[in-house]
Amino acid sequence: MLNKKTLLLSSALILGLAGCSTGGGDKTSSSSNKGDVTLNIFQGKVEFKTQFEDLAKKYEEEHPDVSIKVQTVGGGNDYAGTLKTKLASGEEPTIFTVSGQTDIDQYRDRLSDLKDTKAADLAVEGALDNVKQGDEIVGLPVNLEGYGIIYNKKIFKDAGIDPASIKSMEDLKKAAETLDSQKDKLKLDAVFALAAKEKWVQGNHAANVFVGDDFKYDPKATYEAKDVPLKNSAAFKEYIDLQNKYSAQPVINLDYSQQVEELFSTGRVAMIQQGNWVYPTVEQMDPELAEKGIGIIPIPLNGEAKMPVGVPSYYVVNKKADEKQQKAARDFLDWMYTSDTGKEAVLSEFKFIPAYEEYDSSKIADPLSKEIYKYTQDGNTTTWVFQNFPLDWSDMFGAEVQKYLAGKSSWDDLVKEMQSKWSNARK
């Protein structure tokens, strides 16, 4: 297990170990169970890979007629591209994940109707909106997630910063300047760790905040939009520039593992843009920091600070699997989200914010998820619309941000390029 101590001992060891911890991977976990039915599950959440595999083993113990093989590809690896390759080669998973209407359109002929599952009946309000296709429900939400700016509470306190006071970009800038002026005292390498190597950090999540406002954070309006105004492009540039100015460098080589494990979990930076999914990683590195030392605030825009909360992905059952496999897949998903064993794992092991009713919300495991859940209860959230950007647009946006940060293009060029790519994709 990686932890804070190992990282402090050897920077060389850090990079080697980090690359094989949360960096994703393309490995299939299979049990020795020789059931009558085999479920091949392909999923992209590296953060709970081990916990998911452990739950699959419990299911096999209770259902000896079923064997489960889990393949996880994510983190720094390309889930979408790998899925396309698998399907093109005739390697059809029984269960895989989609993230929005663009994915649904792409794989519609493979998505079976899940409206008769127990889990579909118990999904929280709005959680199935993206997967309703006429009378069919073609996916089950994996969980709810939220993201923003995660900060180190002790560093903020020592610097005299009240995180609740950060309501605007100007407030965030002042906080960054205050932290930067006290770097030596606070033992910081930098204020931020901007993981620009990860195109999804800017292309999905940051873009959702600044581009989603063009469509009032309406997934359907986003999906149907022929053009993208990018009316908040100046604010987006200000946000990127602020992080870059006060970030550990070089940002275009900084990946998720380095951002979360090497820099934030060791207290070498004060802030990162990420979501509640980082909690298990921080907990592995420094359990005390994870439990008591981190908080999350929204990315401010136009004087407002709302937390983006959404369903990151949906489990789907492949219609091309045989009937026996499809039934076993529906049974497994129902068991995972509605049985006592499954619900305990969802809350305590996966550390999810559940997307289903009949869960005890007081048992939400980690402080980041609890804070995000409170934002949902207060109605102080926006939805996720980036899944309904044109196909590959988020990835291209992340690549354009990389070019901008590398000094190979201007922000104006980035805006024109991304407006053109959107319009061409929606012709």
Image (cartoon, rainbow, N blue to C red):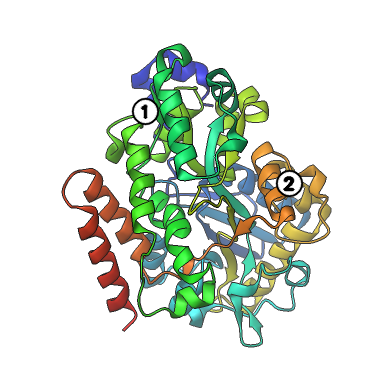
Q: Amino acid at mark 2?
A: Leu
Residue 128 occupies quadrant: bottom right
Residue identified by numbered label 2: 347
Residue 81 position in % (x across, y down): 36, 62
Q: Residue at x 69, y 73 (%)?
A: 327
The secondary structure type at the circle numbered 1 is helix
Relative to 113, 121 lies left or right: right
In the image shown, does 42 or 322 lie closer to the viewer?
A: 42
Query: Which tag is nearer the camera, tag 2 or tag 1?
Result: 2
**On screen, residue 1 above or below 303:** above
Relative to 106, 241 lies left or right: left
In the image shown, does 241 or 150 lie closer to the viewer?
A: 241
Residue 12 position in % (x across, y down): 33, 20
Q: Residue at x 73, y 71 (%)?
A: 120
Quadrant in the picture for the N terminus? top right
Q: Amino acid at mark 1?
A: Gly
Which dot marks residue 286?
Answer: none
Residue identified by numbered label 1: 16
Relative to 400, 306 lies left or right: right
Q: Residues within 10 Å of mark 2 (few under 14, many from 20)?
A: many
Residue 291 occupies quadrant: top right
Q: Marks 2 and 1, how far apart in space?
A: 31 Å
Say if residue 399 shows up in the picture: yes
Q: Residues within 10 Å of mark 1 (few under 14, many from 20)?
A: few
Q: Residue at x 50, y 66 (%)?
A: 385
Residue 317 position in % (x across, y down): 59, 71
**On screen, residue 345 above or below 121:** above
In the image shown, does 165 or 320 lie closer to the viewer?
A: 165
Say if residue 21 shows up in the picture: no
Residue 268 occupies quadrant: top left
